[in-house]
Image (cartoon, helix red, strand yellow):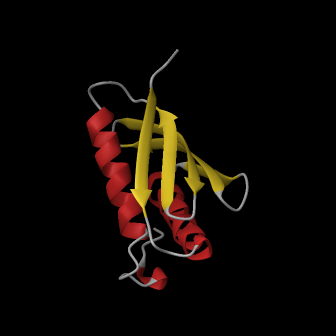
């Protein structure tokens, strides 16, 4: 059984706004890093691809007060970098102080 990576970021947005912001983040991953992002439903998406040396493969879920990403662990050497990067990106996109139209999608 392989280890799992878990990232959880709280938010105070409506679920609709959180979804819109996470869709913008998905666009960023696709356009900037060539990752694959697909949405299974309004609240669940799947991300797969590479950021530098880190292979990211996981499932986003948008809940009322948090966003979670559960995915494949990139290994002990890259685990902390992956968690830090994903937490930082998700937090940036869920920050209500930044207007949605100012979030990068490229």
Instruction: Place residue 76 in its image quadrant.
Output: top left
Tell which residue pokes out farthest to the top in this image. 1
How far from the left and from the top, in percent, is residue 21?
Answer: 52, 71
Query: Which quadrant of the rendered structure holds the C terminus?
Result: bottom left
- Give the number of callouts: 0
Image height check: is 24 above or below 88? Answer: below
Residue positioned 41% across, 82% down in the render:
102
Residue positioned 35% across, 25% down in the render:
75
Image height check: is 100 above or below 40? Answer: below
Residue positioned 37% across, 63% down in the render:
91
How far from the left and from the top, in percent, is residue 49?
Answer: 50, 42
How far from the left and from the top, in percent, is residue 57?
Answer: 52, 38
Q: Is residue 48 left or right of residue 77?
A: right
Residue positioned 37% across, 59% down in the render:
89
Image height check: is 6 above or below 32? Answer: above
Q: Is residue 99 left or right of residue 81?
A: right
Give the camera-side residue of 34 and 39: 39
């Amino acid at each position: 059984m392989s280890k799992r990576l878990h990232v959880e970021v709280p938010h105070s947005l409506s679920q609709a706004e959180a979804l819109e912001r996470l869709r913008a983040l998905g666009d960023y991953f696709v356009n900037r890093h060539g990752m694959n992002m697909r949405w299974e439903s309004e609240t669940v998406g799947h991300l797969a691809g590479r950021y530098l040396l880190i292979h990211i493969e996981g499932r986003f879920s948008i809940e009322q007060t948090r966003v979670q990403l559960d995915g494949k662990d990139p290994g002990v050497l890259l685990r902390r970098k992956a968690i830090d990067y994903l937490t930082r990106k998700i937090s940036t996109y869920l920050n209500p102080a930044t207007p949605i139209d100012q979030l990068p999608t490229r």
